Amino acid sequence: MRAVGVDLGATNARAQAARYQDLLQRGIATHEQVDQITANAAAADATVGADRAAIENAQVQLQYATIAAPIAGRTGALMVHAGNLVRAGDTTPLVVINQVTPIYVSFGIPEGQLPALKRYMAAKPLEVDARAPNEAGPPSTGRISFVDNTVDQTTGTIKIKGTFANQDRRLWPGQFVNVVVTLTTDPTALVVPSSAVQNGQQGQYAFVVKPDQTAELRTVTIARTNGVETVIQSGLKAGETVVTDGQLRLVAGSKVSIKPASGQTKVAP
């Protein structure tokens, strides 16, 4: 309130100084009166400037007493409470804030897979799915946003980060998740259970059940294997039935009887 009052007084003093200058030119006021009024206006302006400096200093001091979070996120348990002494440079934080939206998922891949990852990343942004081990429903989807610049010599892996919008808050800081990175898709791939492929002296093979219910041995070439599924490059056709159990009892031309849950399955395109 004082600053506002002084500011109005300074405005009035300047107006009086202007009027006395006019009176001086008309011969009504003396030079002494004009000098006095002008000095009063200058003093009022100086007072206003000092008060404004005091206000700015008080605002700075108030900022020193206010701690603003550098990011938006979720706070954890408070480390200090009302009445605790807080000093600049304390090693104990007031509170820990974790950013939740967006959130970053870190994982590692073997260095042997890095060339393929870089090749597909150069073509388009790669999506990454993350899901907690015991969580049902569709996974959270993000994009790979960081590839480390060095390989960890102790593990032979390279660090990758995926960025997730996480608007539904399904991913939580510090949580362990299963991550799947899709490099590309092959809609024409032939997929069979890995148990259908056997290793023999002539290489890898599979038994196919022919329409006359006899077994035929086929040499197969594997494109890649992922756990319980194997992608066949050559040797099988879509729609054929393969044997997944009991191959040691079969020879080429043996009769096969299909029973419920017998371990036979069709090749999936």
Image (cartoon, grey):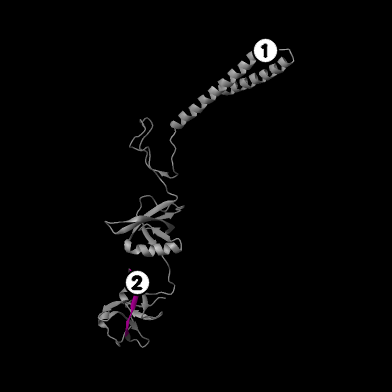
Type of residue at label 2?
Arg
Tell me residue 14's x, y (percent): 64, 20
* C-alpha distance separating marks 2 and 1: 103 Å
The mark lying in front, picked from 2 and 1, is 1
Give the quarter of the figure containing the C terminus: bottom left
The disc placed on residue 153 is: none
- What is the magenta range? 216-226
Residue ID at (33%, 55%): 150
Residue 245 lies left or right of residue 184; in this view the side is: left
Write down the quadrant of residue 204 in the picture: bottom left
Are the residues at dot 2 and dot 1 in contact (C-beta closer than 8 Å)? Answer: no
Tell me residue 1's x, y (percent): 56, 23
- Local crowd at mark 2 within 10 Å, few (<14), some, or many (≥20)? few
Q: Label 2, secondary structure: give it.
A: strand
**Vertical order, 78 against 160 (above or below):** above
Which residue lies under the disc numbered 1? 31
**Vertical order, 3 against 87 (above or below):** above
Is residue 137 at least partly visible in the picture? Answer: no
Tell me residue 4's x, y (percent): 59, 24
Q: Label 1, secondary structure: give it.
A: helix
Let me know if residue 217 is in the magenta part: yes
Mainly helix, strand or loop, the magenta region?
Answer: strand
Which residue lies under the disc numbered 2? 224
Type of residue at label 1?
His
Write down the quadrant of residue 106 in the picture: bottom left
Residue 30 lies left or right of residue 227; in this view the side is: right
Q: Mark 2 vs mark 1: which is more N-terminal?
A: 1
Write down the quadrant of residue 49 in the picture: top right
- Local crowd at mark 1 within 10 Å, few (<14), some, or many (≥20)? some
The tally of labels here is 2
Is residue 115 at least partly visible in the picture? Answer: yes
